[in-house]
Image: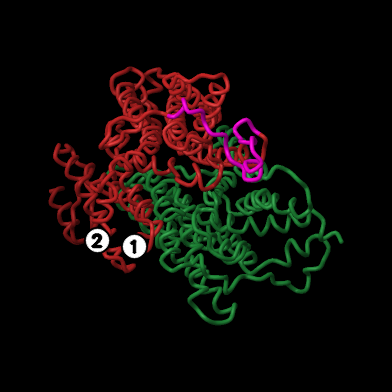
Chain colours: A green, B red
Amino acid sequence: MINDSLLVVVLTQAVLYGTPLLYASLGELLAERSGVLNLGVEGMMLFGAAVGYWATQRVDGSDAAVLPLAVLAAGLSGAAVALIHAFLTITLRASQIVSGLALTIFAGGLGLAAYFGNEVHLADLPAAHQFKNLDVLGLGDVAVVGPILFDQSALVYASWVLTLLVALYLGRTRWGLNVRAVGEAPASADAMGINVSLYRYVHVLLGGAFAGVGGACYSLLIAPGWVAGDTLVNGAGWIAIALVIFAFWRAELCLVGAYLFGGLSALPFALQAHDVTVTPEFLNALPYVMTIVVLVLVSTAFARRRLGAPASLGIPYAREER
Amino acid sequence: MIRLERRLSQPWWLSLLVPIGSLVVAFAIMAVVLAVSGHAPGSTFRNMIEAGFTGNGAFSATLISATPILFTGLAAAAAFRMNLFNIGAEGQLYLGAIGASWIALRLGDHGVTSTPLFVVAMCVAAAFLGALWALIPGVLKAFANTNEIITSLMLNYVAGYLLTYLIFDSASYWRDVSTLQARAFPQGKPMPTGAEWPTFGSSVVVPLGFAIGLLVAAGLWVLYSRTRFGFEVRVIADSPRAARYAGMRTRRKILAVMAVSGAVAGIGGASQIGDFSHVLDGSPQGLQAAAFGYTGIVVAALARYNPIAVCVVAVLIGGLLNAGFTLQGVDFPSGLVGVMQGIILFCALGGEVLIRYRLRVTRRGRAHADAAEAAA
C-alpha cells in the first residue's frame, strides 16, 4: 500500500505539524504588515494551548460543540496577552523587541501558561475532547493525496481557508491596503485619515489570536493534553517568526514554509515508526538548524532586492515627530 | 485621551523615581493576580522576602541563584547595548559548560590538582567555546545580514540537543561509563576534586563564580564607558549611519561584541560546573531546565544594559528565583516567578516611557483648543 510508504507518511505529518506553524506565522504576518514586530509568539502559543485545553475540560457537550469553543478561547487568550504588547509598543512606544521578549517570558512555559496550568491542575486531567481526522468526500483512501490532503482534521482545513482569507484581505481589500500603508509609511497613512494606532492594535491582537489557535493545535490535535514547561510548543513560535521572513511577508508562501518545517519536525517520529535509526538529537535539532540555513539564504537574497519587508517594521509611530 | 510629549530635559530624580515606581506598580499588579487566583498577596510576598533575603542562609542561596544570571545578564547587556539582540546566552552557557568540563576532566586525567589552574583553564575554555558559539549568529549578521535574534535563539535548541547527545546518546568523553549502573542510567563523569571552585565568607557564602562575575562586570563597564571601543559601540547603537560616515568598522564591532557576549555567557557555564554541579548534566531537568539565558535578558533590560546595575538586579532577581525554588508548592505555584519577571519587565518598559516623555491627559476637544492656542 503506497499510503503507508515513508514519503506519504512524512508528507501527511508535515501538514499536521505545519498547521500550528501556519496559524502562528499568519498571525505574525498580519502584525508585521501593520508595522509591529511581536517576538512573543512562543508565549502566546503556549498560553493559547493551556487555555484551549482547559476549555475542553470545563465545557460539557459533543466534540462539535466543545472544540470550536476551545479554539475560540485559545484565540481570545492569545489576543489578551498580545494586548499588553500592543499597549506598550503602540501607545507607549516601547522597544518592540524587548517587549516581545518580555511577553514570551511572561506568558510562556515558565510564566503564565505554567501558572495557569498549575492553578487549574491541567496536567492531571486526561484529554476529554480532541480533533479527529475528517475523511472529506470519502477521498481519504485515494493513493498519495488522500491521506495528505483529504484525511486531516478540521483545524487543518480551517487553516487553508484562513490562508486564502489573509491573502485576499491583504491583497484585494481596502482594509488590507490600509494595513500595508500603515506598515510601510504610517505618516502618509495618517495624513490620508487612516487611524494608525487602531490598525496596529487590531492586527497585533489578531496576530495574538492566531498564535493562540496555533498553540491549541498542539494541545487539542497533535499531542492532546498538557505538559508543564515549554516542551509542548518547543520553539515553534520562533520558527513561525522566521517563516514570515522566509515567506517574504506573503500569506501563500507562509503555507509552503509551514509545511516544509512541519515535515522537518515530523521526520523523527516517521523515521522511528519505520525503524530507521538515526541519532534522535540530530533529527530533533534539524528544524532549528534548517531555520538558520533558510534565513541565511533568504537574507542574502533579501539584501539584493528589498523583498516584502514593511518599511516601518519595528519603528514606533509618533505623529508629533514625523 | 493620553498624549505623549517628548521631554526636552530629563530631571535627575526621574531616573531614580521611575524604576522604584515601576517596581511598586509591578508588585501591585502581582498582588491583584495572586488575589484573583486565591492566594493571599501579603503573606506570599512576606514569604518570598524571607526565603529570598532575610531568612537563615537565604542570602547565600540567593547568591547561588544570582551567579548564572549575573553572567547571562552581563552577556545580554554587552550585546543589547549595541542593539545586537543576542538571545543565545542560554546556548552559549551550555557550550561554556561543555568546554569547562572537558578541560577539567583532561587536567584531572593528567593528575593536575592545583585549583587556581583549574579555575583559569575552565574559564578560558568556557569563554572560548561560548564566544565561538556566539560568533555563528555574529558572522551571519555581519556578512549575510541575517536576523541575529532568530539565529541565536535557534542555536539554543541546537546546543541543548548537543548537551543531551553528549551524555545520553553517545560514548562521548564527558559520559561516565565506568560502572554498570552508569552505563544503564546515563550521566556525566564527575569532575576531579581540584576542579571544585572555592567559596568565600562564612555567614554569607559567596561562590567564586559570583566574584568572577563582579570582576567581569567591572571589566565590561571600563570597556564600554572608558575606551574607544565602547564609544564606537555606543555610536553604532545610537546612529549606525553616523558611525559609518565616521569610518567606524561596524562589521568588526558586531563580531567583537558577539564574541565578548558569548564569552561572558560561557564563563557562566564554567561557573555552573565549577561552583555547583561538578558534572556535565545533559538531562532536560539539569542545566536546560533553569532558562538562565532568558532570565539574563530580564536582568539586562531592568538594568538598562548597565553592567554595574546588572550586578544589583541579578541579586534581586536571584532572590526571586531562590524564593521560587524554596517555596515551590501549594502556596507558591510554579510559573509565578516567570509571571513576576514578565510583569516587572513590562512595568520597567512602561516606566522608561515616563523618563523620555511627558504624559498629558487631555480631553479630545481640549487638545485641539490647546493646539489652536499655541498656534495663535
A314 drawn magenta: no
Horizontally, is B283 left or right of A318 in the view? right
**What SS does tag 1 mark?**
loop
Q: Nearer the viewer, residue B8 or B93?
A: B93
Which amino acid type corresponds to the residue marked 2 in the rendered image? Answer: Ser
Q: Position of residue B288 (x, y in %)?
A: 50, 44
Q: Is residue A191 visible?
A: no
Identify the residue under disc 1: B331
Q: Which residues are magenta?
A: B172-196
Q: How many marks?
A: 2
Which amino acid type corresponds to the residue marked 1 in the rendered image? Answer: Asp
Q: Main secondary structure of the magenta part?
A: loop
Identify the residue under disc 2: B43
Q: Nearer the viewer, residue B325 or A220?
A: B325
Q: Read off the chain for label 2.
A: B
Q: Read off the chain for label 1.
A: B
Residue at point 41%, 28% (across, down): B197
Horizontally, is A147 left or right of A26 in the view? right
Considering every residue shown, the one lying at the far bottom of the view is: A61
B175 drawn magenta: yes
**Placement of A255 over or under A298, stated as above or below:** below
**Placement of A143 over or under A317, stated as above or below:** below
Residue at point 74%, 52% (across, down): A272
Q: Position of residue A219 (x, y in %)?
A: 56, 64
Q: Position of residue B122 (x, y in %)?
A: 47, 25
Q: Nearer the viewer, residue B15 or B193?
A: B193
Q: Are marks 1 and 2 in contact (CB under 8 Å)?
A: yes
Of mark 1 and mark 2, the one earlier in the sequence is 2
Horizontally, is B269 left or right of B232 in the view? right
**What SS does tag 2 mark?**
helix
